[in-house]
Amino acid sequence: MPLSISTNHPSPSPHFWAVVPAAGVGSRMRSHIPKQYLRLAGQTVIEVTLNKLLALPQLLGVIVCLAESDDTFKRLDIASNPRVHTTTGGGERAQSVLKGLQYLSDISHFNNTDWVLVHDAARPCVADAALRELMNVCLRSAAQYTGAILGAPIADTLKRAQDGAIVSTVPREHLWQAHTPQCFPAQVLRDAIDESLAQGHLITDEASAIEWVGGNVRLVSDSRANIKITQPEDLALAEFILTQQRR
């Protein structure tokens, strides 16, 4: 049964938080350490990512959702930042985000003025302007949309395959690649994920949970430079992108 979602979120003094799921191992990187701890631009990937978020003065804090066996994060310098909080994540991304939202509720008792940005630990190249635009769009369009996500139109031709052979060509018109952060009212997102998981719905990102319960999500155009590090060659590309951003 879909939840009843209000699209009217009066926020005279909005509060923004971030949740960063970081409990995965990143097996496709073929590395003996989780990809968020690989070196990038003189830091670890997750430090670069968190510093991008912490540069936002509107952000009250970041909740990092870690694997139960993680003993690396606490040794990073950024772990001592007073705006960085940690909690134990889950086996799947949605479970980690849900645990992060529960932790946030415990420390902030969030209400309808609290928004949360959910961002991949392995997306260190998100631009500051994109982060600010996403938050502004959420506030400006709160009467019409439940929240918003960053995304980019699909540029490549898409093929559907089976057993290594092309079955068909998929029209790419109206298709977008979902990026993060994805921004929603904290309470609404927690209820949506909780309901989706209870119904056994596959949650591939936060927007899919909001869609499942009847929400209306706005797309905010983002640069394709906001890559997610998933393959070994992505590290070199991310290093190049960060160098260009610094210039």
Image: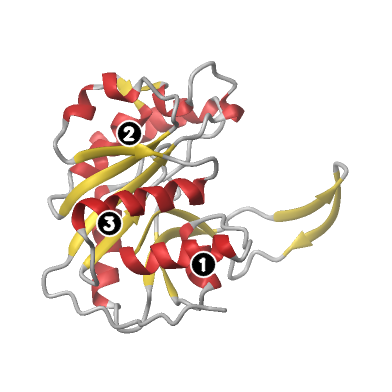
Quickly name the residue at label 2: 242
CA gap, disc 2 to disc 1? 38 Å
Q: Which kind of residue does numbered mark 2 sit on?
A: Leu
Residue closer to the observer: 244 or 197: 197
The one nearer the camera, 9 or 162, is 9
Q: Quadrant of residue 172?
A: bottom right
Q: Nearer the viewer, mark 2 or mark 3?
A: 3
Mark nearest the camera among 2 and 1 is 1
- Disc 3 marks which amino acid? Ser
Q: Secondary structure at mark 3?
A: helix
Q: CA distance from mark 1 to mark 3?
A: 17 Å
Q: Quadrant of the N terminus?
A: bottom right
Residues packed near mark 3 inside 10 Å, few (<14), some (14 to 19) or many (20 plus): some
Residue 128 is left or right of residue 58, and the answer is: right
Quarter containing the C terminus? top left
Residue 196: give x, y in percent of width and height.
55, 65
- Residue 159 in view in this figure: yes
Q: Residue at x 57, y 57 (%)?
A: 203
Q: Is residue 160 above or below residue 39?
A: below
Please tell me whether residue 142 is drawn above or below residue 171 in the rendered image: below
- Residue 247 seen in this snapshot: no
Q: Amino acid at mark 1?
A: Glu
Q: Is residue 171 left or right of residue 27?
A: right
What residue does disc 3 label? 105
